[in-house]
Image: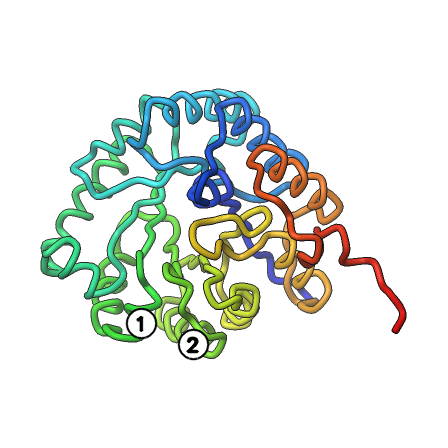
Amino acid sequence: MKKRRIEIMDTTLRDGEQTSGVSFSAPEKLTLAKLLLEELKVDRIEIASARVSEGEFESVKEVTAWAAEAGYLDRVEVLTFVDNGKSISWMEEAGAQVQNLLTKGSLNHLTHQLKKTPEEHFKDISKVLSLAADKGIITNVYLEDWSNGMRNSPEYVFQYLDFLTQQPIKRVLLPDTLGVLTHNEAYAFLLKIIDRYPNTHFDFHGHNDYDLSVANVMEALKAGCHGLHLTVNGMGERAGNAPLASVIAVINDFLPEIETSVSEKTLFKVSKLVSAFTGFRIPPNKPIVGDNVFTQTAG
């Protein structure tokens, strides 16, 4: 059987850092970036949000300097915003080459947060995409609140994707921003989109508010998605993101048609190091990486 290769994007250093009380120092970010790409062998890492702080800027500069030298620069990504090119300037100064542009994936977010029409939003996005293309920056695009968009305003989502898939972008990133998808919805929504845009690369970005992130990832893979966004120890704001170790174990043990580049034997080491850097304790009963998961008591 020919296996389908899935990209793994680790966002511990960006979305994981949004865990309450967590902040990585520049040396910690660099150490983890090296470990994630060189030893764990994930395909891509998302390391920061643009224009957040001077400390974040210095962290990104250190990671991109190493990545450029080591040949990983096209695998290091930064979250950016539709801000008339300010994020792109920040990225350029920091030495980054790939932006993950945050845009609105639901009509509710668009009308209530931005107070814009779809046409106005698309025009603003188009300017950013043109600027990025002119500067040789690779663009992936997030559809923030996409899951609620599919539930409540699917016509907007498809109007947007009709526009977006004609633009100079590499990937479309579909987040379950509030962690509200059921596994049935994850499958149905992704299948509908992937069938409609067969030549576009789609990533799924799950959150764990109902403890369904791993189930949703399995359904996203079944629907044909091309990439997954995960975090070490399931770190992230609120209930966290889809946990890297659990997803890799599930793929390796239950989905023989799927393969990834991730080194499963390195998961435990990365998990412990992230826990040490963040003070984010791993519950003893956490699947795959918890201290108690391979112990058993009779009775």
Q: Position of residue 230 (x, y in %)?
A: 53, 52
Secondary element type, mark 2: helix
Circle 2 residue: 185
Residue at 22% across, 73% down:
155
Tell me which corner region of the image, top left, top right, bottom left or bottom right, holds residue 98: top left
Residue 129's image quarter?
top left
Of the residues shown, which amino acid type is indicated by label 2? Glu
User: Which residue, as the protein is rendered here, is positioned at the far right?
Assistant: 298
Residue at the (29%, 58%) spot, across then down = 165
Q: Residue 138 location, x and y as percent?
A: 36, 39
The residue carrying mark 1 is: 150
Cβ atoms at labels 2 and 1 below 8 Å apart? yes
Residue 75 % position (x, y): 49, 37
Binning the other alpha carbons within 10 Å of mark 2 as few (below 14), some (14 to 19) or many (20 upward) gives some
**Residue 105 drawn above or below residue 76:** below
Where does the C terminus fall, quadrant-wise? bottom right
Judged from the image, the secondary structure of the residue bearing numbered disc 1 is helix
